[in-house]
Image (spheres, grey):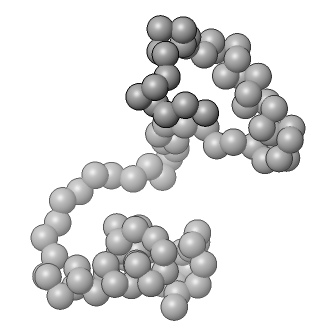
Amino acid sequence: MKKAKEFDFSKARRVTAQETLAFKKAIETTFHVKRPSRGRPPKGLDKYRDVHIRLHPKALEWAHAQAKHRGIGYQTFINEILLHRATGGHAHNSSGPHK
């Protein structure tokens, strides 16, 4: 394949919506995996609220380290810790057990 700088874009065309749908179906059929939809997920009754809080730098550093260790975002980690505490340890944890 030619490098992007060498490609003659004058002959290129946009992919149609029908072609995109056909590609999506082909990927799902071939790999038996449904591709996730793009964009923001629909909000339900338990939608998240956007809040801004100030945290001590050491607490934030700890949250970052713990989240990195678990392979999740630090805001997700903080939310899970608070939800776990608020529900007395009965909160659903979507990213596995604490480490």
The relative height of residue 45 versus residue 20 in the rendered view (above or below) is: below
The relative height of residue 85 versus residue 2 in the rendered view (above or below) is: below
Of 86 and 95, the residue lying toward us? 95
Figure quadrant of residue 75:
bottom left
Residue drawn at point x = 54 percent, y = 8 percent: 11
* Residue 55 picture location, percent across and down: 16, 76
Figure quadrant of residue 13:
top right
Residue drawn at point x = 81 percent, y = 32 percent: 26
Q: Is residue 75 visible?
A: yes
79 sits left or right of 9 in the view: left
93 sits left or right of 25 in the view: left
* Residue 72 picture location, percent across and down: 46, 71
* Residue 87 picture location, percent across and down: 47, 77
Of 22 and 37, the residue lying toward us? 22
Of 90 and 25, the residue lying toward us? 25
Residue drawn at point x = 48 percent, y = 52 percent: 46
Q: Residue furthest bottom?
A: 99
Of 52 and 58, the residue lying toward us? 58
- In what quadrant of the picture does the N terminus appear? top right
* Residue 83 picture location, percent across and down: 43, 73
Figure quadrant of residue 67:
bottom left
